[in-house]
Amino acid sequence: MTTTTATAQSAAPAARMPPQIPYIIGNEGCERFSFYGMRNILTVFLMTSLLLAVPEDLRKAEAKEVFHTFVIGVYFFPLLGGWLADRFFGKYPTIFWFSIVYCAGHACLALFDDSIPGFYTGLFLISLGSGGIKPLVSAFVGDQFDKSNRSLAQKVYDAFYWIINFGSFFASLFMPILLKAFGPRVAFGVPGLLMLVATLVLWAGRQKYVHQPARGANPHSFLKVVWTALKAGGAGAAVAALGAVGALYSLSRIDGLGLVPAVCLALVLVMGFGGAGAALQLDRARGTHPDEAVDGVRAVLRLLVLFALVTPFWSLFDQKASTWVLQADQMAKPAWFQSSMMQALNPALVMILIPFNNVVLYPLLGRAGVKVTALRRMGCGIALAGVAWIFAGMLQLWLDAGQAVSIVWQMLPYAALTLGEVLVSATGLEFAYSQAPLAMKGTITSFWNLSVTIGNLWVLLSNVSIKSPSALQAIHATGYSETACLMFFFAGFALVAAAAFGLVARRYPMQDNYRG
């Protein structure tokens, strides 16, 4: 018996890497160059060209608001892309057609560099196109695997994240130089050409991919089960109603909050309170819907709690392209060095840390008896982001005191933030796919991306809140600048979220939802 089993195990075929993966990785590398190429020069371009009509004392805040509104759109539209792919078209067609929209957005940036309406139209098209494909490409990677070669999936997700940062590194390094030397039309045109190449690479592999069909209309979908539970009345319905009231109040504050933050906050309140209310009385949907559908919704709601606790990480991470760039402007640096070029350090460190973690750190921790789970990685990553912002806040205190601070010191917060990013983002892509029910891969991955939208929403809301008279009075009483106080606030925000994430993760039941 033992001999037979050993023989069978030795005869089992080794896990095989899907041959279509290089097309997806190549597409992602070019697309990420195009996205980060335009994103990493966006704040600088707004400050030095497009928003010159805005008074100088207000221009920094305006540029920061435009940047984070754009990022909110990029990570909000995944909801649309995930729904269209899961319900109607499947992943590949949805990715392809949104990529065409993406290319059109880049064209607008290059052609309308001196027109606010034209340039903002380009930003909208890029947020629609990039957001539409964002949850689908990573889920499309997972579709190429099954349970026989699932062991290779995390390695491919790491490679997927590595190529993202390969594109980001060269974009961060060279785009500021192109902007300064050749102007915005060339600087925004080059990323557009790379997005066109990305679309062609995706199209070239169309006959080789595993295509999971769209699920079509489902009478027992996630939203229908939630709606049935809430219609039953009770405490859950009351909780959901509170979310609706909060959403209406948010929409009534559009003049103070701004259109995009107000609408996004309203949707977050509806989804958050609605999900909490449904979780309280989900069993009331049994009978109307099969037990499998109800249990699937419960699993998704547990997953969304974890996603919500990741949002503070993104509040901190995305400000490296806005707040940290503005901080770098105040630092001592060589004349040829542009502040936005410092962002190249982030992807460079990612490309080093991903292989280091897999080859050295994780095996070393394993031999020491520490089990490196996905949830432990993510919790540590959120905490490291908080540590990075403590470092950034200390640098800001030096600057506020009038000291000459070398930009080399910014390497310290970048290093801590990047290690946190590798632990959160690279791990989260595979985690989101593996935990999603088979019929909801695109939708759940879009919820993962929605956590980035909410993270940037917190940034905009904090910027609005800090302008209130009571907040300004409290800040002035500390003797610190508004920027330094915000940095320490965000550091604390992330550390509290990391502690909460660790507590919730202890009780989370892991799933294995790869196809058979």
Image (cartoon, rainbow, N blue to C red):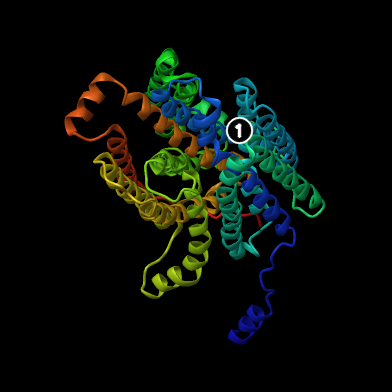
Report helix, strand or loop for mark 1.
Answer: helix
Residue drawn 71% across the image and 36% down it: 103
Residue 58 horizontal/vertical position (percent):
41, 23
Residue 132 horizontal/vertical position (percent):
64, 36
Classify 10 Å Cα crowding around label 1: few (below 14), some (14-19), many (20 and above): many
Residue closest to the far front: 335
Residue drawn 50% across the image and 23% down it: 260
Q: Is residue 260 left or right of residue 491?
A: right
Residue drawn 44% across the image and 51% down it: 334
Examine the image and state in which quarter residue 400 appears: top left
Residue 262 horizontal/vertical position (percent):
45, 21
Q: Is residue 507 visible?
A: no
166 or 114, which is in the foreground? 114
Q: Is residue 158 visible?
A: yes
455 or 102, which is in the foreground? 102
Q: Is residue 165 left or right of residue 145?
A: left
Q: Provide the residue designation for mark 1.
A: 127
Residue 304 horizontal/vertical position (percent):
46, 40
Residue closest to the far left: 477
Q: Judge whether 150 appears above or below 459 on screen.
A: below
Residue drawn 47% across the image and 20% down it: 54
Residue closest to the far bottom: 3
Identified by mark 1, the residue type is Ser
| Quadrant for the C terminus in the image | bottom right
| Quadrant for the N terminus in the image | bottom right
Q: Judge whether 463 appears above or below 299 on screen.
A: above
Q: Is residue 259 left or right of residue 466?
A: right
